[in-house]
Amino acid sequence: MLKKENSSALFNRAKNFIPGGVNSPVRAFRAVGGNPIFMHHAKGAYLYDEDNYSYIDLINSWGPMILGHAHPVVEEAVKQALSGSPSFGAPTRREVEMAELICSLVPSIEQVRMVNSGTEATMAAIRVARGFTGRDKIIKMEGCYHGHADSFLIAAGSGALTFGVPDSPGVTKGVANDTLTAPFNNIEAIEKLLIENKNQVAAIILEPVVGNMGCVIPEENYLQRLRNLCNQHEVVLIFDEVMTGFRLALGGAQELYGVKPDMTTLGKIVGGGLPVGAYGGKKEIMSCVSPAGPVYQAGTLSGNPLAMAAGMALLTHLKNNPQVYANINETGKTLAAGLLQQAAHHYIPAQVNQVGSMFTLFFTKEKVSDYETAKKSDTALFGKYFNAMLEQGVYLAPSQFEAMFISNSIGKEEIDKILIASDLAFKSLS
């Protein structure tokens, strides 16, 4: 058993001053048992905690560290930007260059607005879609997470649809009434909602590849059929690519699947690990955003020079080094196949969903294609597997319902270590 005395002491201190002792709920480790590990620093494929233990990182800050931690290209860009001041509250050249780069890389984006988080990006995108269409309602998919804005914290199922019951205290029933939910990968449910709410739906928002109920993959033609329905009913289609943008391909999931949304929300990699978000889309829609149009959205730190410098350096590196995607995608395939083979060898019911450098090991017999099938996973078994992997020096997402993210710093040595650790973890479960 790892002795995490410094992490335990820090967690006890934190609980006195931070709600639950953490600044984001999943970090609390409640889904897997035990106390959170406090990290001290990271380099390449490895995290190092306050007790001097090291871990191969399969979270990578939930996606943005696609090159690995403390990559010199990103570090140098931030150092140069920092010497000129971390914030101006005024326009800068980097904002223009970043906007040009994003528009050149993402198929659907003609204009883009920088913000400071994925939540801010999705919240603003919904507001713009409502302003553009003059309609109030939105459709989101059960199990897709789009940040903690009120419109997205709505329960799935009959309570939300019939009574407008919000999933989180503090969300009003009025907001809940304007948010409709449907199962992911169920096009018939979307058709039904659009007919029942004719000319009332402003937007459909979804993660094109889901990362927030674990990695869940769109079925064949699902995204294209959504595109067709939105065309038919004049509804704005929004892809939340905060996780998938610049990770599954240089142009995101929309490039990978060949489907163009009307709007796209971005985050994570766009800032090279610094706090950032962005939303963009067709020029006719984005022209509604103030000061060009009447839909108001603002932010003093939007286009922050440090985030722009880090993001520009990272995206430019990815653009100039396409082999990064070949490397991380191959690593994803290798790990997915290895984990599935090990689970079968140890007679552990499991599924592995993997797209490129995103994957999730689900402890369930059934194929996972939506929220309901994901919820059938054995979370207690996952918790045991998680802690066994942690003991072997592999850091997984501390929840069954999160995706893993691979960095380009993970090489053959790390792959071998991960698979050896996993085999021991499975053995402890069987």
Image (cartoon, grey):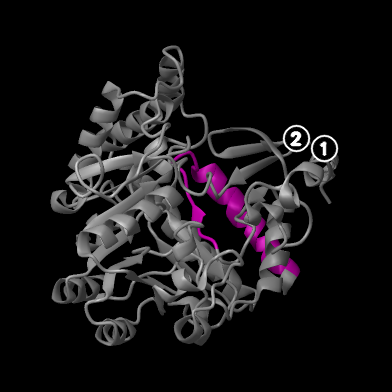
The residue type indicated by label 2 comes to: Glu
Q: Which mark is residue 6?
A: 1
Horizontal and vertical percent position of residue 209 = 37, 64
Report if residue 100 is visible in the image: yes
Q: Which residues are magenta?
A: 402-428
Looking at the rendered image, the quarter that the C terminus falls into is bottom right
* SS at mark 1 in the image: helix
* x 65%, y 76%: residue: 378
Q: Nearer the viewer, residue 327 or 294?
A: 294
Seen from the viewer's position, the closer of residues 91 and 82 is: 91
Q: Nearer the viewer, residue 66 or 31?
A: 31
Mark 2 neighbour density, 10 Å: few (under 14) some (14–19) many (20 or more): some
Residue 50: which numbered mark, if any? 2
Q: In the rendered view, would you say 219 is above or below 304? A: below
Side of 254 where 297 appears, left or right: right
Residue 36 can be seen, yes or no: no
Q: CA distance from mark 2 to mark 1?
A: 6 Å
Look at label 1 and name its amino acid: Asn
Earlier along the polypeptide chain: callout 2 or callout 1? Answer: 1
Queried whether the magenta region covers residue 406, the answer comes back as yes
Q: Residues within 10 Å of mark 1 (few under 14, many from 20)?
A: some
Q: Main secondary structure of the magenta part?
A: helix
Residue 114 vertical placement versus 201 (above, below): above
Contact between marks 2 and 1 (CB within 8 A): the answer is yes
> At 55% across and 43% down in the image, what residue appears?
413
Badge count: 2
Numbered tag placed on residue 293 in the rendering = none
The answer to whether residue 161 is left or right of residue 315 is: right
